[in-house]
Amino acid sequence: MEDLIFAPLVLIIGFGIHQVVLRQHPKSFEQRLLNRSFLAHMAAGIALILVYTYYYTRGGDMISYHRLGVPIAEALRYDFGEVFPEVWALFIHGDYRLPLDPVGLGSTGTMQAVAVALLFLLGNSIYAAALVVSVLSYLAKVMVYRALRSEFPEAAHEKVLFASVLSPTGIVWTCALLKEPVLMVFFGPAFLGLKWILDGRRLIGGGILVALGSAGILLIKPYVLIALALAGGVWIFWARTLRSGGNIVVKPMYFLLAAGIVMVGFTVVSNFFPSLSPDKVAESMQYQRRVSAHEEGGSNFYLEGRDAPSDEAPREGLLSQIAIMPVALVTALFRPFIFESFSAMQFLNAIEMTWLLVMFVQIMRKNRWTDLVRRVTANPALMFCLVFVLVLAMGTGLSTANLGTLSRYRAPMMPFFLLLLVILREPEKSSASAGAVPLLKTVQA
């Protein structure tokens, strides 16, 4: 009954929010693509519940968040003053006392607390909760578009919007009650705030968005914050670097600012999650990969061969990972291939990956490496996309041994990967000036 009451209500409110978004984006291509994106997000939010309920025999994480979240939400309604501090402690990875143990601790506990809050507000309706997250995820992608569009000429804005809001993986795995959708809800504001800081406007508001968004990312997927800090530092440094006659002139103040963003990102993540500190991250990824290889599933893969997985990863450090980095990168960017898809979900994902692979091959065939490097380095936003995609792809590829979980883990990077491909696929005459306008603006600033 609660689904029939709250889910339509959320849809109505979400449709109203979508109308506000449309009024702010009056161009015909914006209206068309945003309408498609909103509908796709709503459909994906509902479809994932059905998939997790009827396709996965064990239900999966989302069903567990709902099943264990309902009694905690009921307890929260019964005694809000007593239970709320414990739910907050669960959210921030603190010590808690709840009437029922949640799905897990750490980032899983944060996701469980988010589920409890949504179920508390929405009468325990899993469909309404999933749709709320889907609406917020849609808004987060709109923020990504608003941050990126000024970095490209107007002729490329349609491609920027398409990549930002209509990446298939970026939609399917950023809806419903899962970590990646909630991560995207925090990522969008953090990314928009970073752009405000880069432009030198709304510095206070930008700082607040970055701080709040980064805090949410830290609690859910801290390794994404490392990638965002690295790519964000490169973006700021590259945008404020003067290029004249092929020479690069570094402005020390902006170099220090970019370096500071990277250092803060690494420091915060390392303090909260020592396993992700620079001296331990390689060992941690190796351990996570081998643990993942032990999990039951029909889509496991082995970067080191079937005999390699063990209960404990040897302490071999970063050098031991170098040999498999190219395979890990290809895996994160292009797998599953069509021939290794043995289920409906994998086959749908493989279609998208094949499409991306075809575009990548076309780009490589029609362009010289030097021309591609020049085009990317001419646009600071493309530099951000390149660094963010490479860092996140390498991290997910080296720490995952299951194609199903890989599809979820790489969802935050897919809009940026798609943007790289659709921009570079076009002839240079239509995209060579992609960074010219923002670069002149930032240099003059």
Image (tube, grey):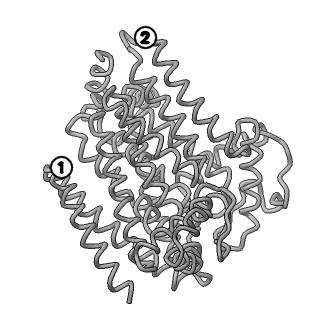
6 to 81, vertically: above or below: below
Q: Is residue 66 visible?
A: no
Q: Nearer the viewer, residue 101 or 321?
A: 101
Q: Is residue 270 visible?
A: yes
Q: Earlier in the sequence, mark 2 or mark 1?
A: 1
Residue 256 in the image: x percent, y percent?
Answer: 52, 18
Q: Residue placed farthest to the bottom in the image?
A: 1
User: Disc 1 marks which amino acid?
Assistant: Gln
Q: Nearer the viewer, residue 284 or 361?
A: 284
How many marks are shown on the rendered structure?
2
205 to 46, vertically: above or below: above
Horizontal placement of 421 versus 281: left or right?
left
Q: Nearer the viewer, residue 232 or 403?
A: 232
Label 2 Cα neighbours within 10 Å, binned few <14 / some 14-19 / many ≥20? few
Label 1 Cα neighbours within 10 Å, binned few <14 / some 14-19 / many ≥20? few
**Which quarter of the picture shows residue 6?**
bottom left
Residue ID at (29%, 61%)? 37
Q: Dot 1 corresponds to which residue?
A: 24
Q: Secondary structure at mark 2?
A: strand
**Which quarter of the picture shows residue 244?**
top left
Q: CA distance from mark 2 to mark 1?
A: 40 Å
Residue 303 in the image: x percent, y percent?
Answer: 71, 54
Residue 375 in the image: x percent, y percent?
Answer: 38, 29
Horizontal placement of 94 versus 383: left or right?
right
Determine whether label 2 and label 1 are within 8 Å by CB. no
Q: Which mark is residue 247?
A: 2
**Which quarter of the picture shows residue 86?**
bottom right
Q: Nearer the viewer, residue 133 or 227?
A: 133
